[in-house]
Image (spheres, rainbow, N blue to C red):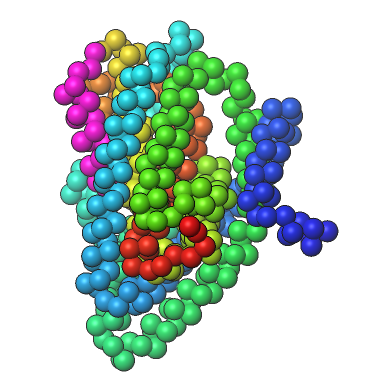
Amino acid sequence: MFKAWFAIPFWQRVLGAFAVGVIIGVVQPEIAQSLRPLGTLFINALKMLVAPLIFTAIVSAILQLGGGERAGKIGIKTIGLFLLTAVIASLIGLAVGQLLNVTPSPDLVADSGYVPKVVPGPIEVLLSFVPTNPFAALAEGNVIQIVVFAALVGVAINQLGDVAKPLGDAIKAGAQVMYRITKMVLELTPFGVLGLMAWVVGHYGLSSLTPLAAFIGAIYLACLLHIVFVYGTMVRLAGMSPWFFFKSIFSAQLVAFTTCSSFGTIPAAHQAITEKLGVKKEYASFVLPLGATINMDGCGGIYPAIAAIFIAQIYGIPLDWADYLLITLTATLASVGTAGVPGTAMVMLTVTLNAIGLPLEGIAFIAAIDRIIDMARTATNVTGDMAVSVVLGKERESLKGYS
């Protein structure tokens, strides 16, 4: 039985579980909601991997990159690509929001349980990057602080040379151990996906989404356009077939879509681009955690743009070209400025609405279906992380297996 199960390609197992979960959610909502523990177990297992995997992988990546200067150059290029795609994402969101009729349904009701997000100041965000206790950051899974501390450790080991070589070798060995544990945990993906999709469909029901169907459709369409045309073009320019790229990362995209966690998808994304696309581990280990923290094309580009148009229409407030320019600028800057802040998408939307003077209370109208929207946002963000990894990897290494 196990032999037959593993004979099925991994992406087909995951896609099949996705489809079964949706069917159960539609046909038997009560049973579907009882399957949520399967998804919770899977998410917990992924979260278990994140902190030790990021720490050991980033330290190992910096050691293999050969010094802080080279890692710094790659970091600058990575952030530059993330900002470029964030601007394009905002423009796509504005275009889709304008071209499609996202006028709210008269049946739309605000979420009475919505609590506005508190937007931290830029100094507060910057200070939060540096951990006061790195062990607490590891225990709490504070990814941006783990990234900063791991980078410092990697640079220090490189500078010390032979004195710190035993520590460097130990961390490299730890990274290999984490890669192996990751492979074990990812075998649970079909079961986790089944449980999560069954719960989402069973919990929300298709009828509850009707008043917001146009808004949800606009988000999904914009995300799809961004993924196919922007990321597809990026990998094509890097010399890789877009079809091969999307086929190879499909299972990781499904993990992102169902878990709604960029951090939780790092193990699946890492495996997909290193084993299937041939990206060197040092590039994947460096770019993916950084991307999960600051690359927010879905959350910070597409979502605030369409949501701002939607909320403006709710209150009958006209927007002009200056407002659209401000939306693009604030959404792009917020994608970096709110790195590591919980509830990033809502925080980014709050920043955008404040910038153009729209009422924050409008967020309550779309807060209830945030999970449905977050699925597309997260899949977009993670796809961008993997595309940038391919671009940077191709720039320095010959990737295998494509034409």
Q: Is residue 314 left or right of residue 176?
A: left
Residue placed at 49% from the left, 28% from the top? 369
Residue placed at 43% from the left, 18% from the top? 110
- 92 over 359 or under it: above or below: below
Give the percent coordinates (x, y) of residue 106: 45, 8
- 44 over 327 or under it: above or below: below
Q: Is residue 30 left or right of residue 397?
A: right
Residue placed at 51% from the left, 47% from the top? 243
Give the percent coordinates (x, y) of residue 328: 24, 33
Residue placed at 46% from the left, 31% from the top? 220
- Magenta span covers which residues? 318-338
Q: Is 319 in the magenta?
A: yes
Q: Residue furthest bottom?
A: 162
Q: Quadrant of residue 158?
A: bottom left
- Name the residue nearer the viewer: 232 or 184: 232
Give the percent coordinates (x, y) of residue 88: 29, 38
Q: Quadrant of residue 138?
A: bottom left
Q: Quadrant of the N terminus?
A: bottom right
Give the percent coordinates (x, y) of residue 146: 36, 63
Q: Is residue 118 visible?
A: no
